[in-house]
């Protein structure tokens, strides 16, 4: 009887051994991902303390403002009531096209404030003389004024009294969808104030078709 008992004991030990879960080697630890640095934030735009140049786009009805330090602003602008073509004569309600300069400080006016440019330019005068739209005497007056750094005569056949101005009470908000000026560039009053406070005598103004 001892042999069967011994055999039974051996079988029980084997069964218990098989019932135990097999001991597996420990799983390798997952590699720890290095922490990524936070994304670099964009530097804030440079403050606009001084405007280096202005570029008006008649077709786009906009004025780009280029500041020292790299900041650029774009404002909605209104132009002359006759939108096609450069100014040729007094009263044609066209905005001139070409290269000009700020000709003086802003002064109060019925469209909030007025910031003059030095129209007509020498190029305007040369073209008008060649087309016999300007007398030789007035051509000389315009070129002489520019040579001396003065505002050119505003009373010739080419017209004058042009620049940038605001909207005033009458045209407030209209510049967003309407070209309503007599040849100037109109901005919202607050935007005109922004420009006027940051330009100086001689700041370049380019007006594109």
Image (cartoon, rainbow, N blue to C red):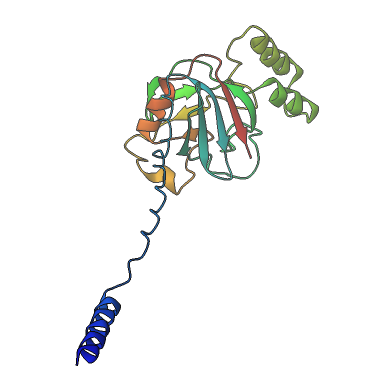
Q: Residue at x 57, y 41 (%)?
A: 58
Residue 79: image location, x then y, percent: 52, 39
Total numbered circles: 0
Q: Residue at x 43, y 25 (%)?
A: 46
Quarter of the image with the C terminus is top right
Q: 62 left or right of 47?
A: right
- Res. 119 visible in picture: no
Left or right relative to 193: residue 163: right
The percent coordinates of residue 100 (x first, y second) are 61, 23
Q: Nearer the viewer, residue 136 or 118?
A: 118
What is the x, y in percent for residue 148? 64, 6
Rendered-image quadrant of the N terminus:
bottom left
On the question of residue 148 being in view, the answer is: yes
Q: Is residue 36 left or right of residue 119?
A: left
Kindly indicate the quadrant of the structure image that contains residue 40.
Answer: top left
Q: On the image, which quarter does residue 86 sit in?
A: top right
Could you tell me which residue is drawn at 43 percent across and 43 percent down? Answer: 175
Residue at the far right in the pictured view: 130
Residue nearest the observer in this picture, 2 or 91: 2
Residue 14 is situated, as x and y percent measured from the top left of the image, at 28, 80
């Amino acid at each position: 009887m001892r042999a069967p008992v011994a055999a039974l004991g051996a079988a029980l030990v084997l069964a218990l051994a098989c019932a135990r879960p097999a001991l597996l080697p420990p799983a390798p630890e997952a590699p720890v991902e290095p922490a990524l640095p936070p994304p670099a934030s964009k530097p804030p735009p440079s403050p606009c303390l001084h405007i280096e140049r202005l570029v008006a786009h008649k077709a786009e009805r906009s004025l780009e403002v280029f500041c020292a330090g790299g900041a650029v602003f774009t404002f909605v602008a209104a132009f002359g009531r006759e939108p096609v073509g450069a100014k040729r004569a007094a009263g044609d309600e066209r905005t001139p096209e070409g290269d000009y300069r700020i000709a003086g400080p802003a002064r109060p006016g019925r469209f909030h404030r007025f910031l003059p440019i030095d129209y007509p330019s020498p190029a305007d005068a040369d073209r008008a003389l060649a087309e016999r739209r300007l007398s030789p005497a007035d051509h000389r007056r315009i070129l002489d004024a520019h040579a001396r750094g003065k505002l050119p005569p505003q009373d010739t056949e080419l017209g004058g009294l042009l620049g940038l101005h605001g909207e005033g009470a009458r045209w407030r908000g209209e510049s967003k969808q309407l070209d309503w000026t007599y040849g100037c560039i109109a901005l919202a009053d607050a935007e005109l104030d922004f420009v006027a406070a940051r330009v100086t005598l001689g700041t370049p103004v380019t007006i594109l078709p």
